[in-house]
Amino acid sequence: MKKCKITIDKIIFEVVLFNSPTANKIWNSLPISSNIKTWGKEIYFYTDVLASKEPNAKSIIEFGEIAYWPNGKVIAIGFGKTPISLKDEIRLADDCNIWGETKFNLKKLENIAEGQPIKIEKI
């Protein structure tokens, strides 16, 4: 089972990678460093990873799922409502590949500011 850690300032959490083409491409690209963008209760950041949309890609994700948006080469971490959410769903801007999951309480990301550095590394 492949695992990575995501570090944002003093927040560090573990992600378990799924067995998927996107997860493998992300794993092979680690470490990844970028700067955070925010959109409602979602943080996202640009990468050099190039992966195609997978058949099970989706825009409404479950709390704890970690996504990759093929059209933007972006890793997205949704943890609540975005500007296009209906009710309490976590709705991303477009269909994304779900490449991993975390048990970390992602609500702790609510005060992360745009522009903060983020790093993903192999464990």
Image: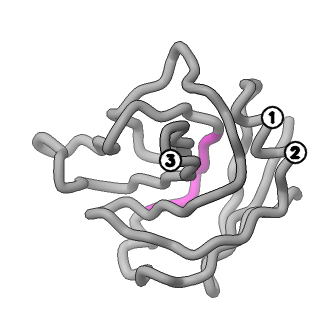
Label 1 secondary element: helix
Label 3 secondary element: loop
Q: Is residue 36 left or right of residue 18?
A: left
The residue under label 3 is: 72
Mark 2 nearby-residue class (10 Å; few <14, some 14–19, many ≥20): few
Instruction: Name the front one of labels 2 and 3.
Output: 3
* x, y percent for residue 16: 72, 43
* x, y percent for residue 94: 35, 36
**Image quarter for residue 50?**
top right
* x, y percent for residue 31: 83, 62
The residue under label 1 is: 24
Q: Identify the amino acid type marked 1.
A: Asn
Instruction: Name the front one of labels 3 and 1.
Output: 3
Residue 6 in magenta? no
> Residue 28, labelled with which disc?
2
Spatial distance from mark 3 to mark 1, Cα to Cα? Answer: 18 Å
Q: Is residue 89 left or right of residue 52?
A: left
Q: Is residue 44 left or right of residue 89?
A: right
Q: Residue furthest left?
A: 87
The tag earlier along the polypeptide, 2 or 3, is 2
Specify start and end residues of the magenta stretch as a single range.
Answer: 100-106
Q: Identify the amino acid type marked 2.
A: Asn
> Dots 2 and 1: beta carbons under 8 Å?
yes
